[in-house]
Amino acid sequence: MAPTVCARCRVSRAHVKRPKNHQKLCKDCFITVFEEEVHHTITSSGLFRPGDRVAIGASGGKDSTVLASVLKTLNDRYNYGVKLVLLSIDEGITGYRDDS
């Protein structure tokens, strides 16, 4: 069986199947599409304005790390003009964040 080709670029091998539409994408196209969707959500909803300070809840896990990375990338690329700040809360639970 031949490897599946990316549905977007039609050149690279697909490595990701998106759950929401079953589209099979290569790594580069997945990142591009993901960033475009996040940018669209930010701009179409007026999520923030230039000069806003945006706090990103940072747990040290993969979800908050990706969120911080994508917001930094998009803020630089599209010049949103926001200041990004990482926010971590110590819940006071012994051992809870030892590996984060």
Image (tube, rainbow, N blue to C red):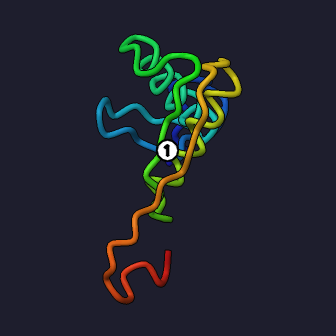
Residue 1 rendering spot, x and y as whole percentages: 49, 48
At horizontal 52% and vertical 25% (from top left) the residue drawn is 52
Residue 46 rendering spot, x and y as whole percentages: 40, 14
Residue marked by disc 1: 67
At horizontal 33% and vertical 34% (from top left) the residue drawn is 22
Q: Is residue 62 above or below residue 69?
A: below
Residue 57 rendering spot, x and y as whole percentages: 43, 52
Q: Is residue 82 above or below residue 67?
A: above
Instruction: Give the residue furthest to the bottom.
Output: 94
Which residue type carries mark 1? Answer: Leu
Q: Nearer the viewer, residue 35 or 98?
A: 98
Question: Where is residue 27, by image quadrant?
Answer: top right
Instruction: Give the residue furthest to the right.
Output: 76
Please state if 66 lies on the left or on the right of 89 as rendered: right
At horizontal 57% and vertical 17% (from top left) the residue drawn is 50
Please state if 98 lies on the left or on the right of 19 as rendered: right
